[in-house]
Image (cartoon, rainbow, N blue to C red):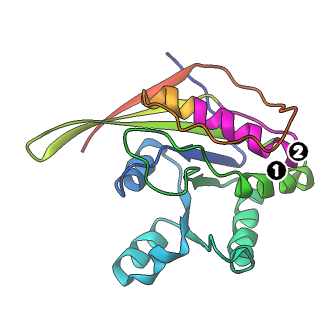
Amino acid sequence: MKMTLPDHGPMIILPKHQYWTDIPIVSIAFKPLLYFVAKRELFKYPLIRNYLFLLGGLPVDRKQSIRSLDSFRILVSLLRVGEKIVIFPEGTYFRKEVGSGKSRLLQMILKFQLELGESIPFIPVGIRYGERSGWRRRVEVCIGTPLYGEKESDAIPLTHRAMEEISGLCHLPQVIGKSEIRNPKHETNSNDRNINLNQ
């Protein structure tokens, strides 16, 4: 089914996270240059650090948020000029299921959105890994339709909706987390675009 993504302006891409290969797979599925938010611990290893920086990696410290302010300022500057940012909302690998998702960074982006003066689309992305056949493995990337939030308090319901969409796109069960914000306001629909890749 044909699916239309915004052809200009900033975008937040929210993929399923199962393996390290998710990063290059998402890079292939989306043609424009992408920037990836990644946990700071990964940048300790020289080879991985160089690879992540090559892909436009933005380190985030999950334990000390103050250390992530510089990275968030860079993220904001990228959104201002219409760049595409990839955030793995689960925060770590979840295999055979979909995590409940983390909303803090989305909350900060929604706060910035008010200053930006335009709605930022959040794109749920499912990644389906098939069975291995020798060294090869079929991978399918399913791109959902954009989700939107209006204000900071929409962050958690927006995250919940994104994880529901990702669960459906991946055909994987969802881990249900606790809700922290009431009266969610968001919009979406269930159309998606499928991209077949071979790994």
Q: Classify residue 135 as left or right of residue 90.
A: left
* Image coordinates for residue 26, horizontal then vertical, percent: 44, 47
* Image coordinates for residue 92, horizontal then vertical, percent: 49, 57
Q: Residue at x 66, y 20 (%)?
A: 189
| Residue that carries the numbered disc 1 in the rendered image | 110
Please give the label number shown on residue 151: 2
Q: Classify residue 136 as left or right of residue 8.
A: left
The type of residue carrying mark 1 is: Leu
Determine contact: label 2, label 1, CB under 8 Å.
yes
Q: Is residue 189 above or below residue 124?
A: above
- Towards the viewer: 10 or 15: 15
Report crowding for label 2: few under 14, some 14 to 19, many 20 or more residues within 10 A (C-alpha). some
Q: CA distance from mark 2 to mark 1?
A: 6 Å
Q: In the structure shown, which secondary structural element does the residue marked by tag 1 occupy?
A: helix
Does the image show residue 84?
Answer: yes
Residue range of the region highlighted in magenta in the rendering: 146-164
Q: Residue at x 83, y 33 (%)?
A: 184
- Towards the viewer: 173 or 125: 173
Q: Is residue 152 magenta?
A: yes
